[in-house]
Amino acid sequence: VVTIKGGTKTERTNFYTALYHSLIAPNIFNDVDGRYRGADFAIRQLPPGQSMYTVFSLWDTFRASHPLFVLLYPDIATEFVKTLITKYEEGNLLPVWELAGNETGIMIGYHSIPVIADAYVKGLRNFDLNRAYIAMKASAEANHLGLDYYKNKGYIPIDRENEGVSKTLEYAYDDWCIAQISEYLKQPEERDYYLRR
C-alpha cells in the first residue's frame, strides 16, 4: 500500500492514477491450473503457487518500473525475475521485449539483465543467481543486433548496424550490470571483462 500526504486532490489523483498505470504490466500468463505456453511453444506446467508473466517491455520499464516493483512488491518482482530466467531456458536468450510468451525482437539492449541485477543488489534472494548469471552472459555473448561489432570493436559502427550509437550505450550499461553480479559471485576476471566492454 502506498499512502501519500499533502498535495491537492488533483495531484493525489494524478499520483495514484500514475501508480495504477505503472502496474498494468507485466501480467500473469498462465492459466488457473498453472499451464502456459512456453517461449519454445511447448505447453508447460508451473509448480503450485508460482506464476508465469508476460508483457516485458523492458527497454521502457527497466529504469523505473522494475525498481519500483522491487521496492513496493518484492515478492512479485522476484516472480518476474524467475520468469525471465525461465524464458531464457525455454528460448536461449533473456527477453528484450516479450509479448504473449514470445520475444518480439523490436527493441534494443538486453535489459532483463539490469532487472535481475537491481533485484539482487536490493536484497531479493529468492531466485537462483547462478542460473540468472548464465542467462545474462548468454544474452551478452550472442552475435546478433550488432553485438559482434560491439564485442570486437567496443562500439557498433552506424554504417554497419541501425541504431549503432544507442545499441552501444544500452549494451554498455547492461554489461556494467553483469560486472556487478560478477563481483557478488566472486568472478574477478569476468567482472573485469564486462567492465572493459
Image (tube, grey):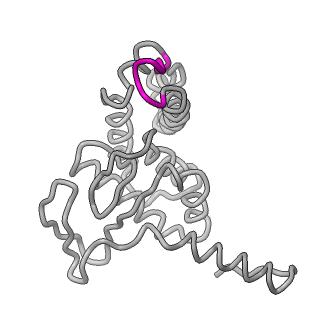
**Residue placed at 48% from the left, 26% from the top?**
164
Q: Residue furthest top?
A: 153
Q: Going by the image, does 109 lie left or right of 42?
A: right
Q: Quadrant of residue 13?
A: bottom right
Q: Residue 59: x percent and y percent? A: 50, 49
Q: Is residue 77 magenta?
A: no
Q: Going by the image, does 54 lie left or right of 19?
A: left
Q: How would you classify the magenta stretch by its main secondary structure? A: loop
Q: Is residue 158 magenta?
A: yes
- What span is colored magenta in the figure? 154-163
Report how many numbered discs are placed on residues in the image.
Answer: 0
Q: Residue 45: x percent and y percent? A: 17, 70
Q: Residue 157: x percent and y percent? A: 47, 17
Which quadrant would the N terminus be assigned to in this image?
bottom right
Q: Residue furthest left?
A: 42
**Residue placed at 16% from the left, 54% from the top?**
40
In the rendered view, tell whether residue 109 sits above or below residue 1: above
In the rendered view, tell whether residue 182 sits above or below residue 27: above
**Residue placed at 53% from the left, 72% from the top?**
23
**Residue placed at 29% from the left, 64% from the top?**
100
Q: Residue 26: x percent and y percent? A: 43, 67
- Closest to the observer: 44 or 26? 26
